[in-house]
Amino acid sequence: MYILLILYNSKLEKIVFYYFSEADKALPIIKPYKLINVADLWNSLDAKRKKYSCAYHIPNSKKVDEFIEAFNLMSFDPIPKQKIIDEVNSIPQFEAVRVCRLVREELESQKERGNPKSEDELSKNFMEISRIGLREGILPPALLMLYIINIKNPRV
């Protein structure tokens, strides 16, 4: 919110805001602004992520549906099951190993700090994992699903 205060008090006439998901489009900004999908920016910079077609085994099961439902409840930004599965299958194994290592390191760090003492602390722990995904350009539920798929991989 601090950045919004800076924008309010600035002499900017118009703000261009790049959004990733539909939930990002709801902005509490009173100055004129323009919304642009960040994918358009990436295309204009020729910075699109390479697309791979992997075939991870993701069972069509109630447990997978429950995982997605739980994630969507926690994130307030529902993502359809097929979009998550497509995202998981677009990440090659060498990249999966790298990002899953980052998740494992964060989970180990959280474990060292002890169990969360409040719902707020639990939410912050969850957000740290989400940030890894967003920083790496991966939808957070896809990153978590990828981690679960690779949890027994000794390289992770």
Image (cartoon, rainbow, N blue to C red):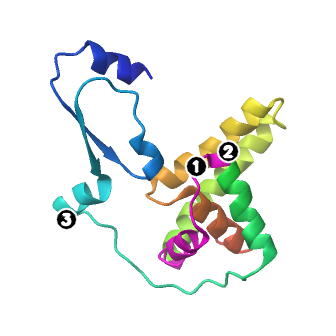
Asked which secondary structure carries label 3, the reply is loop
Say the numbered circle drawn on residue 46: 3
> Amino acid type of disc 1?
Ser
Q: Position of residue 126 (x, y in %)?
A: 67, 44
- Please report whichever mark, 1 or 3, sits nearer to the chain's N-terminal start: 3
Residue annotated with mark 1: 130
Look at label 2 and name its amino acid: Phe
Real-space Cα separation, disc 3 to disc 2, in angstroms: 32 Å
Extreme residue in the top direction: 9
Instruction: Say whether residue 91 is magenta.
Output: yes
Q: Is residue 54 left or right of residue 17?
A: right
- Callout 1 secondary element: helix
Q: Residues within 10 Å of mark 1 (few under 14, many from 20)?
A: many
Kindly state the secondary structure of the residue where label 2 is placed.
Answer: helix
Task: Residue 102: give x, y in percent of width and height.
Answer: 59, 55
Query: Who's the residue at 77% across and 65% down the image?
Result: 66
Q: Residue at x 68, y 47 (%)?
A: 74
Alpha-carbon span between mark 2 and mark 1 = 6 Å
Q: Quadrant of the C terminus?
A: bottom right
The x, y position of residue 65, in whole percent, is 73, 70
Toward which corner of the image does residue 49 lie, by quadrant?
bottom left
Displayed quadrant of residue 11 = top left
Residue sitting at 74 percent across and 63 percent down?
Answer: 67
Q: Of callouts 3 and 2, which one flags the residue occurring earlier in the amino acid sequence?
A: 3
Depicted 154 relative to depicted 4: above or below: below
Number of residue marks: 3
How many neighbours does mark 3 have within 10 angstroms: few (below 14), some (14-19), or many (20 or more)?
A: few
**Which residues, given as a range, are shown in magenta?**
74-93
Q: The residue under label 3 is which amino acid type?
A: Asp
Circle 2 crowding by C-alpha within 10 Å: few under 14, some 14–19, many from 20: some
Q: Nearer the viewer, residue 89 or 153?
A: 89
